[in-house]
Image (cartoon, rainbow, N blue to C red):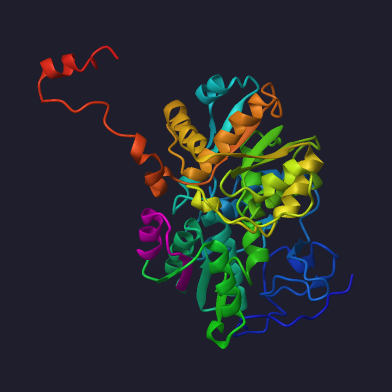
C-alpha cells in the first residue's frame, strides 16, 4: 500500500522522513487502512479515522526472540524489538517503567469463588505509581525523534504526573493541563516535578478540547502532546502490559482479563499486544476474553454495550473514579468490538461498590488500589456473580494506580479501629487483644 505525505501539527524542528523508531515503519488508519509516514499526526486525512503504528516485526525463531526478551532489562525496554523505539532506547535517560508484579491473588480468589487462578497485574509499582509511565515512556521517544522541546498532555491526573516526571528525567520542558477539581494528591504529584501545571475550569473533555485548539495554534509550536499528536506512539506503551502478563504466566495468554476503560486505548492495545504475540509464535494461539470496566457515573461504553449499540453516546462524568472520568472516550467503539469479538463484556459499578472493592483488594492481598482499581475489582466480582466470568479459568485483573493518590475515596470510612489510653487495661477494655 502506498504511503502518503500528510501535513503535521505542532511542527517539530527536524525532517521526520528518516526518524528511527525501531520496527515502526508507518502510521496506518484504523478505519480505511491508508498509510502515512511516521510523524506527529493522529488522524487520517482521508476519513478522519485514528492512526496507529504499523510495524515490520521480527521474524524467525520464536524461541530465540523469547530468549532475547528474557535476557533484556527488567523494564519495558526488554520489549524494544516490538515497540516504536530505537534499538538503543535503554541507554537514554528514562524512568524505565514496566515489568511490574503479577500477583497471584489466592485470598481474593477465595473471596470471589475463583478456582482457576486469579492474578492482579499491579501497575502501582511504576515510577509515578500508575500505568501511565508506560505510555509516556514511548511518547518521549517519539518526541525525541521528532525534535520536540516541550511535553504536554490533557490529563485526569495520573498522566500529568507521568509526563512531569518523564520530562524532568529526559530533559524536556513540560506543561500539562488538568480539570480544576482533581484529587489533591494527583495535583501535588503533577506539580512537584517543576513543570507548568494548568488547571482548566471544566471536566476532562473540556481540557481535551482546549489542547486540541492549542495544538493547531502557533503557541503550540514545538510541543509534543503525548495523548494528541503523539497519541499513535503513546498508545503502544499499553501493549507492554500484554507482553508482561503473557511472559509472567509462562508465555501463555490468560483465559480472561478485566481492564478499566477511560478512553479505551489501554484495552485496545492489550488486545493488539496479545494478537502480536500469537502472530510471532511467542504464545499459543488460543481464545481469550476481554472485559471492560467502568464506573457507573461515567459509563458511556458500558451503556452502549448493554444496549447493543455500536455508537458510544457521550456522558457528563459524575464519579469518584476520576481517572476513568472521560465522558467521550476516543476508543469506545473499538472497545465494544473487542469485547464482542472475544466473548467478553463491558460492565460498570457504582461509587459505593468501588470503595468496597478497594477495601476488599487491600484486605485480601495487601494492594491499595486507586479508584480505577476498585472499579476493575468491583466489576470482576459483578461479572462472576452474573456468570459472565468463568471462575474455573485463569483470570487477570488490572490495578492501574496507587490508592495513595485517591485517599478521599476511602478516608470517610477508614480510620483507627480504636483510640485508647497508653495502658494495657485500656487495650483489654477495647476488646482488641483477641480480635
> Front-most of 375 and 224?
375
Vertical placement of residue 199 versus 279, above or below: below
Question: Residue at left 27%, top 26%?
Answer: 417
Q: The N terminus lies in which quarter of the figure?
A: bottom right
264 sits left or right of 1 in the view? left
Seen in the picture, residue 373 relative to 57 is either above or below; the reply is: above
Asked if residue 282 shows in the view, the reply is no
- Residue at left 23%, top 26%? 418
The residue furthest bottom is 218
Residue 344 visible in the shown view: yes
Residue 44 location, quadrant: bottom right
| Magenta span of residues | 174-192
Residue 109 percent coordinates (x, y): 56, 23
Can you give x and y, in whole percent of width and height, for residue 422 in the image? 10, 25
Q: Residue at x 60, y 19 (%)?
A: 113
Total tally of numbered discs in the picture: 0
Amino acid at each position: 500500500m502506498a504511503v502518503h505525505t500528510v501535513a503535521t501539527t505542532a511542527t517539530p524542528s527536524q525532517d521526520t522522513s528518516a526518524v528511527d523508531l525501531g520496527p515502526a515503519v508507518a502510521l496506518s488508519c484504523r478505519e480505511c487502512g491508508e498509510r502515512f509516514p511516521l510523524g506527529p499526526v493522529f488522524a487520517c486525512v482521508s476519513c478522519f479515522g485514528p492512526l496507529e503504528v504499523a510495524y515490520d516485526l521480527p521474524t524467525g525463531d520464536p524461541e530465540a526472540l523469547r530468549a532475547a526478551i528474557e535476557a533484556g532489562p527488567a523494564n519495558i525496554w526488554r520489549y524494544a524489538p516490538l515497540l516504536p523505539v530505537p534499538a538503543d532506547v535503554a541507554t537514554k535517560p528514562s524512568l524505565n517503567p514496566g515489568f511490574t508484579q503479577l500477583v497471584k491473588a489466592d485470598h481474593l480468589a477465595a473471596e470471589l469463588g475463583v478456582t482457576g487462578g486469579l492474578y492482579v497485574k499491579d501497575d502501582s509499582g511504576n515510577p509515578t505509581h500508575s500505568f501511565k509511565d508506560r505510555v509516556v515512556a514511548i511518547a518521549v521517544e517519539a518526541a525525541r525523534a521528532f525534535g520536540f522541546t516541550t511535553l504536554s498532555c490533557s490529563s485526569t491526573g495520573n498522566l500529568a504526573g507521568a509526563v512531569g516526571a518523564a520530562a524532568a528525567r529526559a530533559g524536556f520542558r513540560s506543561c500539562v493541563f488538568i480539570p480544576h477539581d482533581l484529587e489533591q494528591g494527583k495535583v501535588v504529584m503533577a506539580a512537584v516535578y517543576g513543570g507548568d501545571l494548568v488547571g482548566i475550569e471544566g471536566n476532562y473533555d473540556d481540557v481535551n478540547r482546549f489542547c486540541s485548539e492549542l495544538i493547531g495554534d502557533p503557541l503550540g509550536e514545538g510541543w509534543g502532546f503525548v495523548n494528541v499528536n503523539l497519541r499513535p506512539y503513546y498508545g503502544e506503551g499499553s501493549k507492554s502490559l500484554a507482553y508482561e502478563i503473557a511472559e509472567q504466566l509462562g508465555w501463555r495468554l490468560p483465559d480472561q482479563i478485566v481492564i478499566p476503560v477511560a478512553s479505551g486505548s489501554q484495552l485496545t492495545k492489550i488486545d493488539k499486544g496479545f494478537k502480536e504475540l500469537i502472530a510471532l509464535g511467542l504464545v499459543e494461539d488460543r481464545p481469550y476474553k476481554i472485559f471492560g470496566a467502568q464506573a457507573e457515573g461515567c459509563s458511556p461504553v458500558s451503556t452502549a454495550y448493554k444496549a447493543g449499540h455500536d455508537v458510544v453516546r457521550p456522558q457528563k462524568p459524575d464519579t469518584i473514579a476520576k481517572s476513568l472520568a472521560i465522558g467521550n472516550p476516543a476508543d469506545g467503539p473499538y472497545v465494544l468490538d473487542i469485547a464482542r469479538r472475544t466473548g467478553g463484556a463491558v460492565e460498570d459499578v457504582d461509587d459505593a461498590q468501588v470503595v468496597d472493592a478497594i477495601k476488599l483488594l487491600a484486605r485480601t492481598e495487601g494492594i491499595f488500589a486507586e479508584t480505577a482499581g476498585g472499579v476493575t475489582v468491583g466489576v470482576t466480582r459483578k461479572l462472576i456473580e452474573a456468570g459472565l466470568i468463568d471462575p474455573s479459568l485463569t483470570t487477570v485483573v488490572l490495578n492501574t494506580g496507587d490508592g495513595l493518590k485517591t485517599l478521599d475515596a476511602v478516608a470517610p470510612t477508614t480510620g483507627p479501629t480504636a483510640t485508647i489510653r497508653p495502658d494495657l487495661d485500656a487495650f483489654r477494655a477495647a476488646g482488641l487483644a483477641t480480635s
